[in-house]
Amino acid sequence: MRPSRGQLPIFAAASADPGPGDLAGLLIGPGQVVRMGGTARVSVVVDAPWRVHALDAELRRRDLAMQWEPSTVEGHYGVRTSYSGVLAELSARWLRGAVKAPPSAFLLDGVRLRLWFTAAGTVTPDSPELLLRLGQNDEQCWTPAVRALAVLGFPVEAARGPALRISGRRRIRRFAELIGEPLPVVPLTAWPA
């Protein structure tokens, strides 16, 4: 376990109880949500087995069942929750018809940021930067994501992928404080320090 420095930030992942609304962190990135009757399901495609296991642990903390399967993209995995009534409110806030769009007052916190990074974040070895992948066809989420990160003190640059880049050792350190310690299944080199 990495040593903690100073006081826990108010928006840190460790300062909040997990809940189904946290999955907004997946939706601001490449996650998707669909409704069926009074239920909904959240899904995301990830690029590493550790992400599948880490998301499984995160979803179980929220009492959500998860399934996964190999994706049509080689080396990727589709992760999805079961349809659940507890996700209906989240889907109502994030769907305009069948199109995903963040609520107008969308904000990030450490918990949502943790889920986004777990599903789609990458640290660059030997470089003070990290990337947060966005949904390929979710342009309506890109500007709100930039704005929500800026509110937390993370100015970002657009990167290929599409993705957002956060640069600077101090920013990466603060990012790491916000998202908390990695789960045991996460390679230490895959998590910001």
Image (tube, helix red, strand yellow):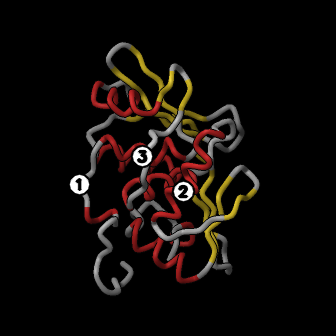
Q: Quadrant of residue 37?
A: top left
Q: Quadrant of residue 147?
A: bottom right
Give me the disc on residue 105. 3
What is the CA distance from the residue labelled 1 to the residue labelled 3?
A: 21 Å
In depth, the one of 160 and 1 nearer the eye is 160
Residue picked out by circle 1: 17
Residue at 33 percent across and 42 percent down: it is: 21
Tag 2 or tag 3, which sits nearer the N-term?
Answer: 3
Disc 2 marks which amino acid?
Arg
Q: Secondary structure at mark 3?
A: loop
Give me the disc on residue 147. 2
- Categorize mark 3 by other alpha carbons within 10 Å: few (<14), some (14-19), many (20+): few
Give the side of residue 24 with respect to residue 187, left or right.
Answer: left
What is the CA distance from the residue labelled 3 to the residue labelled 2?
A: 10 Å
Looking at the picture, does residue 77 appear above or below residue 95?
A: below
Q: Secondary structure at mark 1?
A: loop
Residue at 54 percent across and 49 percent down: it is: 144
